[in-house]
Amino acid sequence: MPAHIDEPSPTQPVDPWCFLVHGWIWLGTEQGKIAAIEAWIDDRQLGETSNLYPRTDVAAAQGIDAAARTGFLINGCRFPERHGGTAGVHIRARRHDGTRSEPIASTRAIFAGGRRSPLGALLENLAPTARGLEIGAHSNPVPGLSPYFTDSVAVFAGSSGRADFLADAVALPVPDDTLDYLCSSHVLEHLPNPLGAIWEWHRVLRPGGWLYLVVPDKRYTFDAGRPVTPPRHLVEDFFNATTAADSADHIDDFIFHADWKRLRPGCPPQDEAKQREEAHAHYLEQLHREQRVDIHFHTFTPRSLRLAMWLAGLIECDAAPFRVAAQAEKYPGDRRDGIGMLLQKAGRPQARGAMNTHLVRHENAAVEALPVVCPVTLMPLQLAGDGTERALVTKDRARRYEYSAGLPNLIPPVGAAICRRWQRRPWRWFNRVASLGRLTVAPRD
């Protein structure tokens, strides 16, 4: 047998919107001619990979060198047309000369109904020209969508990511009731005040709009050794408007309890303690300099995330601002380390009024332009400058936002007092945490 498909399994349903094809191939003397491994259903190619990796189990079974590259993993395969039912998945080898083999290995995939997938449910409810925003996509955007993009940095890990403007996830420079959808994948854990972020995302969605969330499930990541962040703690961070400057304890938890072998896989065991101390000192120095701290501030499980959202009055309560449209564990199917949720903002869609402010244009002219406003006051902005030193300013000239790496930098100044209606939540929400212990909250005026 020259190849085998381990996944998808013919007995385990997969998400048609996002699944992986995993297996091995060994063609003997022909192995070196392989340029890529392709996954197909009938005459449709689902995806491909040019990266093969060693598999010791295959090497032992085939009697070959343990360093031989035989394993393949094709991420992001999609077959959304098949909501339920089965289909044959085949593997082909594409050679360096451009020719392609006949199917070398096959299996049958069982496709779950699309409504079980948060992404599938989102795509089924969006028009092709829907106006959306994805936060923190960098180079790995949610598949199947064409949103605007924002991030807190123009360059991350040495490479430029997807961004139309720079922004803080808890103080978006977007008017109320503007977006048809908002996506956040593996972002919430990087925020000191995640519940505040969700309330802010609710603000910018129009009634009936969709919030697509993917949050790492700590049980399947390098956070596995850390305790689950108590929902009470998340609510405290929300009511206290916690920022990175308040987060030295979060840094301690991340550095000294994360699985270092998974967080820094190239670190020799004898250097682990030293690396932890150096990283700890580095992050504390960033706090001191009021720089961005990129850690997992909090950890989540499906239960803790949903409970925290309930405690903060976001879901499953009287006049809840969101309804839960879909939820999935071990999500998405090509990673299986996260929690997927699709939330819909309560209320009926309303006609949008034009706002006299600066507009960001989409590469697809059919998608409505996105108005951007001052992230502190939500006042309109206008373009100022002579073309070489551009900036966006409020009409009263009180606030000015420069461009950074060619992008409008709409991140609020350090220390700016952000004012939002959602920050003043009724104190009746505290009744929900009585059974979890007393909250530590700094009262506001």
Image (cartoon, rainbow, N blue to C red):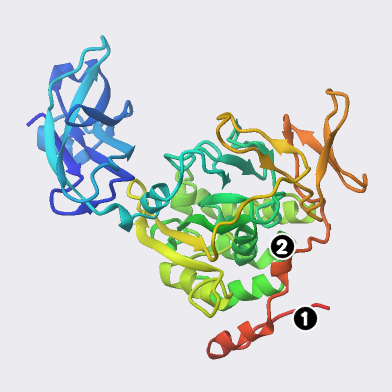
x then y, percent, for residue 281: 69, 54
Rendered view: 241 above or below 178? below
Q: Amino acid at mark 2?
A: Thr
Image depth: mark 1 or mark 2 in front: 1
Q: Position of residue 34 (x, y in %)?
A: 24, 19
Spot occupied by residue 263 in the image (x, y as percentages of width and height): 48, 50
Quarter of the N terminus within the rendering: top left
Tell me if mark 2 has few (under 14), some (14-19) or many (20+) residues whose alpha carbon lies within 10 angstroms of its own: few
Task: Decide if residue 285 is on the left or right side of residue 216.
Answer: right
At a point 54% along the width and 75% down the height, the residue shown is 231
Which picture quadrant has residue 101? Answer: top left
In screen coordinates, is 9 left or right of 76?
left
User: Measuring 25% from the left and 54% from the top, which residue is drawn there?
Assistant: 113
Q: Relative to residue 43, is residue 179 depicted above or below?
A: below
- Above-or-below relation of 445 to 61: below
Please indicate, yes or no, whether residue 137 appears anywhere in the rendered image.
yes
- Decide which of 27, 84 is in the foreground and name it: 84
Q: Is residue 28 above or below residue 174?
A: above
Q: Quadrant of residue 132?
A: top right
Q: CA distance from mark 1 to mark 2?
A: 16 Å
Q: Where is the C terminus found, in terms of image quarters? A: bottom right
Relative side of 179 to 108, left or right: right
Mark number for residue 243? Answer: 2
Q: Which residue is mark 1?
A: 443
Q: Earlier in the sequence, mark 1 or mark 2?
A: 2
Residue 36: image quadrant is top left
Q: Residues within 10 Å of mark 1 (few under 14, many from 20)?
A: few
Pick out the residue farthest to the front.
351
**Helix, strand or loop under label 1:** loop
| Disc 2 element | loop
The mark total stands at 2
Q: Amino acid at mark 1?
A: Pro
